[in-house]
Image (tube, rainbow, N blue to C red):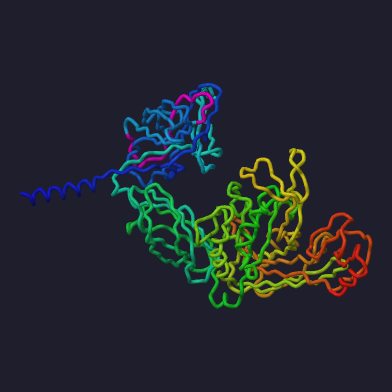
Amino acid sequence: MKKLYAILFIMCLCLSAHAAKGTLYVGYPIDYDYVYSYDGFGGLDKDTKIGAAILVTRDMVAPYIGANIKGLRIGWADPTASTKATTFARTELNGEDLATGTGTLYDRNNGSWNTVNFKTPITIAEDFDHIYVGYQCTLKAGSWGVSNMYPHNQAGSAFLSREGVNDESGQLLWEDLSESGTLSIQLIVEGETSEYGNIASLQNLRRYPIATQGETSDGLLTLCNEGMSSINSLTLTYTLGEKSEEKAIPLKTAILKGKKANIAVPVCNLGTGEHSVSITKVNDTDNRLKGTITYYQTAVPADVAERYTRRPLVEWIESENAWNCVKYYDDYLAPGIDSYRDRMSLLSCHFEDQFMTGDDEELEMLLHLCDKDSSKIYVPTFMIDRTQMVTYSSDAICNYALWAQGVVMPQFVGPLYEAALELPTFASVTAEIDYDEQTLKGQITVSGEVAENILAESDELGLVVVLVEDKVDSDSQLIDEVKQDDKKDDKKVRRKGDDDGSQVYGHVTHNNVGRYRLTPLYGDVITEEGTYSKTYDFELEEDWKVQDMRVLAYLTLNPQKNGKWRGNVINSTEQAFPTPEGIRTTTLSCTTGRAYDLQGRQLQGHAAKGIMIRNGQKIIKGCSINSLESILRL
């Protein structure tokens, strides 16, 4: 008898497991556990009946055919104003209700989700095309409870209506505000866990766009668990033409349902060309979503990579309009790169200030890198070879750490530099300077070699040449007298509005300033393989300090016609200006031109005494004969 009970108990457990129900949330922002208080639509001057809705397409629910839409999950972002709401599902915004529900929307925890079930669930049928789901309620005057979430610019993610505002036909006007925000409205989909588990979608793959052919490189994969069970393992399939390779990825930490995750993955480099990657299996079961991500890869044979030494380019992005740029440079970038400086080139890109080159072209470049999404640009920040960019970018990789924003702390940035130094290259670049210190004119010859049979026919390299100067003094950080702050040269001052009360110097020193670019933004085009050589004429400004100047030249893969940014830096070189040989020692009481001391600092007024440099000549001013003789013996 006991055995019979045990058998029946086991059978019940099995039936229970088979029939276990699970739920998940489907919408536009699907992995948020909270909504932001006071962040949304509203602010009307009187109590008004409003409507809020999103469009749900077949693609959004295709993996869940046969499951039920149980109700809606709705975010509310105003702790001072709760409201009664009627939910709906319709094929048209002003159409007949397919399902309805009632509930209260309120913020119980500084931005909260509310569950409102439909009276009768909706089955997602095979012929499902689309529905609009949302709610109508009375929004109290001044309330911002209709929660607005990121990301924006998602078609169908935000429709709003207001009582008394009708269209030309007299029906309620629903305004599409998807570009302004995404409504926190989600479907609650219910089904059997065993049937609707093991579903994952690819969001992004960040990786190095150049790698050694036939080898795997590091990548960072962003994916979403869109099934009703946790994900413990994946199988990725990489394809290039007829070539294909699978990689099994066990996960140390399970990805829970409805959650996004960034995981380190190997990236296959099957050759030069457009690859695709897909998640073919989840938990050793075929993935029900068949989406792929495509990426272009440049493959360098190992014997070619051995012929060239690669010098990465580190670019520091700043603007004098952001007062903390110099502090970040001194505290973060400079200490981190110190031990790598002789193996890397360094350039500071300014925009919207006096040191920018061209018509704010650096900002144009950043927008290209960020796929024209200005919200992804952080200042100050830095990037390595324009592929390890420390902002969000659809075509980049930061392989030893999670994707960072802004600036990486110096104690953590080393692995990024190491990874950049290990990348292969297939081209060389060198620079020679011929400079006349008297006329401030000269020529720069940049030459090198591009290996054969690496680039695709549509690829083109760009050669960029920039004159760079260190120790550039600026007083633009001085406090503006109009703001009624103290304004005293070279004295620590406190800025109004500084939260931490920090103090900064009025004068600041910029390093690695791109003084003048001798080429277009994306460089002079190089399309032919083999050797190349280009010569550029230049003339220095009188206030540039030649002893602190160098030439920076680098090769990039240019942006493609279809808009895909592949502007990674292939190789770079730096060459210091030659030390002036014709410096003459002269005693003068006064002369024209700006004067500098031997440390390169500009001297102010006529009170300075001693030895200085003016117009490339050594000047002695206000010295006794004994002092002069001492100086001449140096």
Q: Residue at x 61, y 71 (%)?
A: 310
x, y (%) of residue 600?
79, 63
Residue 139 in the magenta stretch? The answer is yes
In which quadrant will I find the C terminus? bottom right
Please state the horizontal and vertical placement of residue 389, each as a whole percent of the image.
58, 57
Which residue occupies 88% across, 56% down? 607
Q: In this view, does 143 lie to the left or right of 321?
A: left
What residue is rendered at 35% in x and 32% in y? 118
Residue stretch in magenta: 121-144
Question: Between 566 and 62, which is closer to the camera in this rendering?
Answer: 566
Residue at horizontal 49 percent and vertical 56 percent from the top: 402
In the figure, 111 relative to 284: above or below?
A: above
* In the depicted structure, whether residue 620 falls above or below residue 319: below
Q: Which of 142 and 97 is in front in this view?
A: 142
Query: In the image, residue 177 lies at what x, y percent?
Result: 54, 35
Is residue 430 toward the left or the right of residue 562 in the image?
right
Instruction: Say which quarter of the image contains residue 418.
Output: bottom right
In the image as oriented, which residue stretches furthest toward the left?
1
Check residue 516 for magenta coloring. Answer: no
Instruction: Count numbered badges in the picture.
Output: 0
Up-down relation of residue 236 to residue 62 (above or below): below
| 25 vs 533: above or below | above
